[in-house]
Amino acid sequence: MALVQQVLDGHKESYNHLVTRHMQALFNHLNILVRNAALAEDLTQETFIKAYDKLYRFDPQKAQFKTWLFTIATRKALDTFKKKPTVDIDEIVVVSELKSPLQHAKDREVREAVSALEPKQRAVVSLYYWHGYSYEQMSSILRAPKGSIKGWMHRAKQALQEKLS
Amino acid sequence: MNERELAKRLKTVTASPMPTELQQRIQGNVSDYIARRPVPRRHPWRTTLLIIGLVFALASSIGAVIAPYLALVAGLSIMMLGLPLLFWNTSLFPRLNVKAMQRVLVVMVLLGLTLSSSATVFAAAHMAEIYARLMQTIAKDESSTRHTELGFRLEHCPALGSSSRRTEQRYALSNRATLSPAEAEKVVQAQCIEQAAQKTAAEKWKGFRANDTSLQEGQTVQLYSFRSAAQITGLSPIMIKWNESTSQTFDTQPALIDINGQPADWSTLSLDSLVVPVLASPATIHISDSGNGRRSAIPRSVPGAQQTLVGLIRLPSEVDFKYYDPALRSQLVAIHQCEQNVQDDCIAVLSPTVILRQSVPEANARIQGRIVERGEIMLKIQSKPSHRQFTVELPAKAIKTHQAQLQAGTFVEVNYRASKQSSTAISSGDIAWVYVLQDVLKKHDKPQSF
């Protein structure tokens, strides 16, 4: 919040700290959602730019800055599916080479299974398991009722259980 | 795989670090953008624009219901506001959500266009309605004014035909001579009287124009020029009634009249008649628009202006004829004289106040008229020999309807019989008046007698 306030007070360079802090999580989330590294990169940039332009709208009383960023990013990502509903699954970028080959293979299998889900199911899985958001927060980010979130999650789990078992 | 195992497996997938190159690229791009952009602030104009739009939309909605004009203004305003924004140079604001903005503006323009067009139709209809009502009100006022000012209405005028015919003529006069409706009414009224008199004169009288010859008893004089004179022969008194067809000052400034070089007794003038108390024979009546600084009663500039002296009635000799009650005088208005032919249709002289004013032609006579206003009926007889004016209430049996209160439109036939033995004998030449005394009696507890 302090960084946000500094930016609003005229210290624009403080925004770079915010970008550095949240860029990776945001990129990974978008990468899972859109299944395209280049598009995820663009969306990450656009998310930070939009967040900067609308920074005066950010209300720390309602959500954390990260949650606010994820809200913008998720909506942007889901909007892309309205125009480009299909993306080749092979375009998913593998960004980790530091893990053991076995772990890497397991991670890749999980990511591919998640990537095969419907966009909203991917979104809830990513937000819940990899970014730690609650159902209520997901409801706010995805602008959907809590029941819908649970439904998407339930169907996502069913699909993943079938694929990963 | 159960749910727990799935959750465990999903959570083991850790976030992978982004390639440094990718991080630098994103950060660099964002930094460049930020460097070009000002510090993010809320733009007051956007809020203002939103408020203005909402106000206009609200005003348009309300205006469309309560006043099409408001909607018209609001619609045009919206269009004026929306059109420039629609063609906004978006390159100045590269990050503005132009498409969303344009959608809103398109809606605004369409809304404005719809409101303006529909409001124009409503406004036109509204204006037409207002105009129609205005015309109706004016016509009503004119009609009311005519009846009020002139105080009479001819129920029928055989010489001129139907009332619609007279209406047409009245309006034709009004248009041609730029007369007011009231003045045109007077002209028509005069024509009606004149033609009615001529019709009667063709049977019994010898109508003539002024300066033609001496007047005889019962003759009608029509003075077509303003400087006219008629010489009276025979014994006095006479009663002169005239109608100034186009006078604009008729009500307040009657024509200057002198008799044998002496000014007429203005106290005996009423709106439309002059009763000359005593006239030596021969007498010459001059009606002039000059002398004593009096204004002309008839503007010469008015086309067709003419002075019509109608109904120069020879009264019985030696009648010291006092004019009737001054209070009534102001209420007496134009009289339609048909004189001796009491059975003629044109006898119907109708007024809100005066039903009939009729010279009694003979000992046994009958006068008829149709009441145009509700009121009590009274017969008023002015007679000799007592040099007094009698006011005699009609006996109920004299009125066929036997009603004290008569409704407008009731036909009244008054029969009276002269009796020389009575002090109130009615003689030939006496004038009988039938009034509706509704208003008169309020001013006088009982009719005046002399």
Image (cartoon, rainbow, N blue to C red):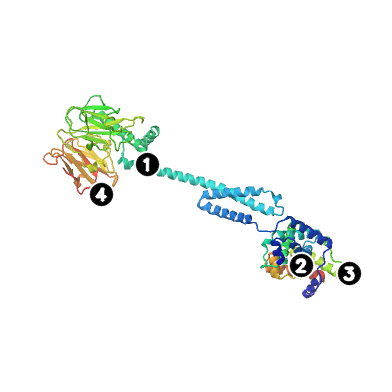
The answer to whether any part of residue B233 appears in the image is yes
| Nearer-N-terminus badge (4/1) | 1
The span from disc 2 to disc 4 (Cα, nearest Å) is: 101 Å
Secondary structure found at label 4: loop
Q: Nearer the viewer, residue B221 or B227?
A: B227
* Tag 3 and tag 1 share a subunit: no
**Cα distance in 3D space between marks 2 and 1:** 87 Å
Task: Please report, as a chain letter, where disc 1 is located.
Answer: B
Give above or below for B208 relative to B84: above
Residue A100 image point, x, y percent: 88, 70
**Chain letter behind tag 2:** A
Q: Residues at badges 4 and 3 in contact (C-beta under 8 Å)?
A: no
Disc 3, SS? helix
Residue B11 picture location, percent across and down: 79, 72
**Which disc, if any, is residue B142?**
1
Image quarter hosting the N terminus of chain B: bottom right
| Residue denoted by label 2 | A126
- Residue B50 lies, in percent from the top left, at 61, 55
Rounded to the nearest angstrom, the CA distance separating label 3 from label 2 is 23 Å
Say the numbered circle drawn on residue A101.
3
State the residue position of label 4.
Answer: B405
In this orientation, which residue lies closer to the viewer: B425 or A124? A124
- Is A42 left or right of B275, judged from the image as shown? right
Residue A124's image quarter?
Answer: bottom right
Q: Do the residues at pointers 2 and 4 share their chain?
A: no
User: How far is mark 3 from mark 1, CA to CA?
Assistant: 108 Å
| 10 Å crowding of disc 4: few (<14), some (14-19), many (20+) | few
The three-letter amino acid code for the residue at tag 2 is Ser
Image mark 4: chain? B
